[in-house]
Image: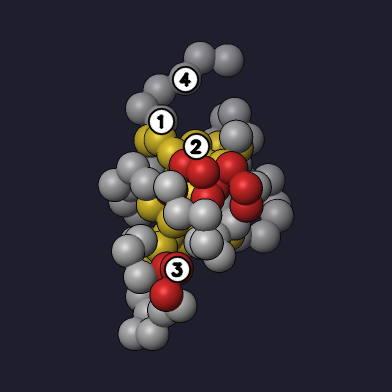
Amino acid sequence: MKLAKVKGNIVSTIKTESHQRYKLMLVEPVDQHGASLGGDTLIAADGSQAGTGDTVLIVEEGGSVRQILGNKDAAIDAVIVGIVDTWEG
């Protein structure tokens, strides 16, 4: 799992069949202090009702994502599995 910050929603008028049921979010990986890791942003399916600005936990591995979503045919590489309220480090 990785920490990430939700940057916004992805709006698409046409989606592949495996994406139809999911809200897609743009997320940026962050460190334990909330600072950007400087990497690429990702598109993640939202499994936790996250919103823009939320710090979230993401799983970024196809097989695990498909298992979490319960869809063995999903062409999704990342999913938001939780919203982080606070953490100690």
Task: Name the residue furthest bottom.
Answer: 13
Q: CA distance from mark 1 to mark 2?
A: 7 Å
At x 55%, y 37%, the residue is 3
Residue under numbered circle 3: 18
Residue under numbered circle 4: 87
Q: Nearer the viewer, mark 3 or mark 4?
A: 3
Q: How many marks?
A: 4
Note whether 59 is above or below 26 in the view shown.
above
Query: Does residue 32 appear in this view?
Result: yes
**Local crowd at mark 4 within 10 Å, few (<14), some, or many (≥20)?**
few
Q: CA distance from mark 1 to mark 3?
A: 27 Å
Label 2 near label 1: C-beta < 8 Å? yes
Q: CA distance from mark 3 to mark 4?
A: 33 Å
Label 1 is placed on what type of residue? Val
Label 1 near label 4: C-beta < 8 Å? yes
Identify the mark nearer the N-term, 1 or 2.
2
Which of the numbered marks, if any, corresponds to residue 57?
2
> Which of the image's four quarters has the N terminus?
top right
Identify the mark nearer the N-term, 1 or 3.
3
Identify the mark nearer the N-term, 3 or 4.
3
- Indicate the position of residue 76 as horizontal and vertical percent values: 54, 60
- Indicate the position of residue 56 as horizontal and vertical percent values: 45, 39
Which of the numbered marks, if any, corresponds to residue 84?
1
Of helix, strand and loop, which one carries label 3? Answer: helix
At x 54%, y 47%, the residue is 65
